[in-house]
Amino acid sequence: MLRDPLTKWLWDGRRSLLGWALAVVVLGAGYAAFWPTIDSPAMRDALANYPEALLEALNYTDIATPDGYLSATVYGLVVAILLLVYGIGAGARTIAGDEEAGTLDLVLAHPVSRLRVALQRFGALVISIVLLNLALLVSLLAISGPVGLDGITLGEYAAMHTHLVLFAALFAAVSYGVGAAFGSRAAAIAAGAAVAFLGYLANGVLPQVDGLEWTRNLSPFHWLTGGNPLRNGIQAGDLLIMLGLIVLLVVLGTWRFERRDVAV
Amino acid sequence: MTDIAIRTQGLVKTYGKTRGLAGLALEVQTGEVYGFLGPNGAGKTTTIRLLLDLIRPTSGSAQVLGIDPQVEGVALRARTGYLAGDFLVDGRQTGRQLLTYLGNLRGGVSKDRIGALAERLDLDLDRKIKGLSRGNRQKIGVVQAFMHDPELLILDEPTSGLDPFLQQEFAKMAREATADGRTVFMSSHIMSEVQQVADRVGIIREGKLVTVERVEDLRERSMRKVVIQFAAPVPAEEFASVPGVRDLTIDGAVLRCRLDGMADTLVKAAARHTVVTLSIEEADLEELFFHHYANHGEAGDAA
């Protein structure tokens, strides 16, 4: 450890990462453990009486199947929001937070390029997102048997997690990019939060209005679970959009960071 | 290898409407300790951060160890050590962890070297940094700046927060560095902080270099306070004409004056009488510095 900016970033964030892993596991597996209450005749009757529009807004149309339930609650909502909050916070800390704390100067006064520091730190951030995903996957696999969430293959889980990693990395890239470009932690967090809020609206609320169904296609939430990777496997189009945006944001933010003044 | 460690020409840095530097021309020779003096806000930190490529000049050029910081910053920073007056780091790590990491960014610095420096400064490396006093935190900064024996040390108000004993030790370390042919560039807003270490001082004001002086010349030129008590009253005219004597007053058997330059003639003149006590107070460079500075300042304002 402590070899380079990548390992240092992970080492510095180890306690925080452990806390997030705990939160993801407790809330993710906790929601999954409620599956038996949904998978009951009484609940199915109750859901049948809900207005279709409400179910759609909540992404609950498919909720009575194991993959539909996990998509709507765990992957599409609870863990998605946890990970996007983690991504935004960690992305803002990576350059802008360190800079505002006045601690970035010291590292940049060493023989490392800004490019190397920035990209290694973002790489470390992506690794931490993968680790959080692994924690969730392992805990879901462990409880899926006991609570009867069956019928989902490991390959389908892997596809879902590939989408989730890129989803969280996308929000991390927004706040990383804005923070690296402008050196403001507040702006970085605001940008991430704005994308999250608008993305949520565009996926669940705006499509209820006639003529605005298309907004769904612009939402990261749609790219995450819209194609239902838990049932249909990898959705290449959604992954490519997210990957493309991540690359674009990282390149632009880093490019600007290399050329601007580092604040005291 | 060149004889000039740092050279800047017409260095200008503007922040929006305010000017950080207004055409700074610096020349620091290899192997010297250069004191970079000026009040807060004069542009000292701006200059230093330009030299390390943490910020970029609006115009003008800088050559550090023969390298343009903007072109080969990484290669340059491998050969420099940097210490900020306010040494800020994440407090949730120990000094040893931080120094190991920073050493690794430089391709590795031996544990023994870090340990020896820490011992010399009486620094506990195994405590969390947030639990350290400001002075002890600053010591970690001193260690990281010196530990790889850089060719050029760039120190921004390095001894602020250090106690007098450590200031002494720091001065010794700076001297040892130059004895090895290395260069020290240190800023300060207090003359006394640099006068014991520096070979030359450059004075910066409002983003411009006002003057550069050898500390020795300053000391020689500066006035010393002389008080001589004689056994009996002495005639004033005998001393009034002595070269270098200023502000002479004779109060019975006690002579007071300021002395500019050599003491020889005054001592010989005094030796013709019976001298009871003789005191010559060392030059107060601080006073001289601000005197000098104020004059230049007025000239600058008038222009």
Image (cartoon, rainbow, N blue to C red):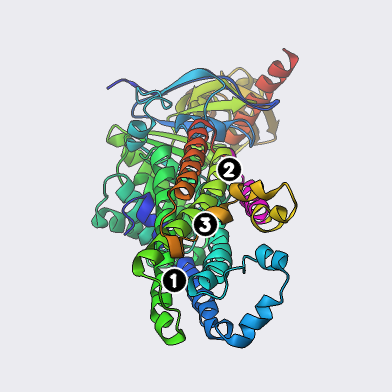
Pointer 3 local density, CA inside 10 Å: few below 14, some 14–19, many at least 20: many
**Residue at 65% across / 82% down in the picture?**
A45
**Residue at 40% across / 23% down in the picture?**
B68
* Residue topped by disc 1: A136
Q: Amino acid at mark 2?
A: Val
Q: Amino acid at mark 1?
A: Leu
Which of the pair A260/B109 is nearer the observer?
A: A260
Q: Alpha-carbon distance for marks 3 and 1? A: 16 Å
Secondary structure, magenta segment, majority class: helix
Q: Is residue B290 left or right of residue A90?
A: right
Q: Amino acid at mark 3?
A: Leu
Picture quarter with the N terminus of chain B:
top left
The label shown at residue A224 is: 3
The subunit carrying tag 2 is: A
Label 1 vs 2, first from the N-terminus? 1
**Residue at 53% across / 81% down in the picture?**
A35
Pointer 1 local density, CA inside 10 Å: few below 14, some 14–19, many at least 20: many
* Residue topped by disc 2: A178
The subunit carrying tag 3 is: A
Secondary structure type for disc 1: helix
Pointer 2 local density, CA inside 10 Å: few below 14, some 14–19, many at least 20: many
Question: In the rendered image, is residue B134 in sight?
Answer: no
Task: Check contact, mark 3 vs mark 1: CB within 8 A.
Answer: no
Q: Nearer the viewer, mark 1 or mark 2?
A: 1
**Span highlighted in magenta in the image:** A182-200
Task: Residue A185: say if magenta.
Answer: yes
Q: Is residue B86 left or right of residue B249?
A: left
